[in-house]
Image (tube, helix red, strand yellow):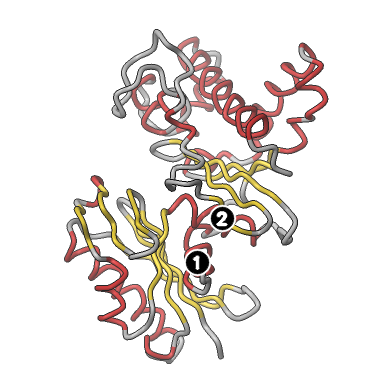
Amino acid sequence: MTLRIGIDIGGTKTEAVALAADGTVVAEHRLATGFGAAAVLDTAENAVRALAAALGSTPEEFTTVGVGIPGAVDRATGRVAHAVNLGLEDLDLGGDLAARLGRPVRVENDVNAAALGAWQALGGGDSDSMAYLNLGTGLAAGLVLGGRLWRGSRGVAGEIGHIPVDPAGPVCPCGQRGCLELAASGSGLARSWAGGDSVRELFTTAATGDADAVAVRDRLVEHVAAAVRLLVLTVDPDRVVIGGGLSSLGDELLGAVRAVLETWAAESGLLAMLDLASRVEVLPRDFPAAAVGAALVGASGD
């Protein structure tokens, strides 16, 4: 049986999947992510060995291994130049993990991996285009054009969270002022609302009429809608798929974002023509997009 392994290494947890040749997930495993180079490598290796044990196999029998990880990734070499939340600096993740597992390993940025996983989950074809809008601790997009990841000339395509939208806004950790990420992300939510980064709690409180929660919710939704508009105006994908931690609200978030897009369309002939509201959707809840995408990256020569 041909099995491809995908690993999504997050700041607190790691998720690994085994994909059959037809793309079906046949096994999954989750575990806590260690901090620092040695611990991250141990985490990835342990995830693969746990899948092998569950399948009555060994890592050497797997066809390929792919890893999605946050931070600056050199996909050609498999090195992670920098991932502050994981305590990584210039880690040869691909090479070191391949040596441990005896299998080839490819490494990709986690948002790009999730974009590829979402594209497969939603039945994307070779001629389809999709923007995956990741609403997590930060905000970024992964682009799948014609069935292939589009990374840009320097690998930063889709880093729309660092497009300034408020010249008078607060300073972003990137050094710019008023970046989109400051308003439409988990970290932005934590800074602007006393309830922390729980988007579900925010929406629940706003539904009671709490003025502060309503203001923060509306600002968040409007900036997510702005991100959708930005992606359509710059890339014009067939669809924009919202994923990441903040997407856990599902249809509640989707409905709010669509309502904003429809309001804008009523005020602008251009936006009405683009039909933004019908082009946005939310990734199915609990689908391991980044791990599935990592498995696809691992099997790809791209």
Instruction: Residue at 52%, 18% (x, y): give it.
Output: 219
Instruction: Residue at 57%, 24% (x, y): give it.
Output: 221
Q: What secondary structure is found at the residue carrying circle 1?
A: helix
Among numbered discs 1 and 2, the one appearing first in the sequence = 2
Instruction: Residue at 52%, 21% (x, y): give it.
Output: 217
Dot 2 surroundings within 10 Å: few (below 14), some, or many (20 or more)?
many
Q: Nearer the viewer, residue 193 or 10?
A: 10
Query: What amino acid does circle 1 point to?
Result: Val
Q: CA distance from mark 1 to mark 2?
A: 9 Å
Q: Is 99 positioned to the left or the right of 253 in the image?
A: left
Q: What secondary structure is found at the residue carrying circle 2?
A: strand
Instruction: Residue at 52%, 83% (x, y): give it.
Output: 3
Query: What amino acid does circle 2 point to?
Result: Leu
- Provide residue 209's location: percent of width, then percent of height: 55, 13
Q: Quadrant of residue 106?
A: bottom left
For the N terminus, the quadrant is bottom right
Q: Is 269 positioned to the left or the right of 192 in the image?
A: right
Q: Quadrant of residue 191?
A: top left
Q: Nearer the viewer, residue 286 or 267?
A: 267
Query: Pointers 1 and 2 in contact (CB under 8 A)?
Result: yes
Dot 1 corresponds to which residue?
297
Position above or below: 1 against 7: below
Dot 2 corresponds to which residue?
149
- Provide residue 238's location: percent of width, then percent of height: 73, 44
Position above or below: 149 against 18: above
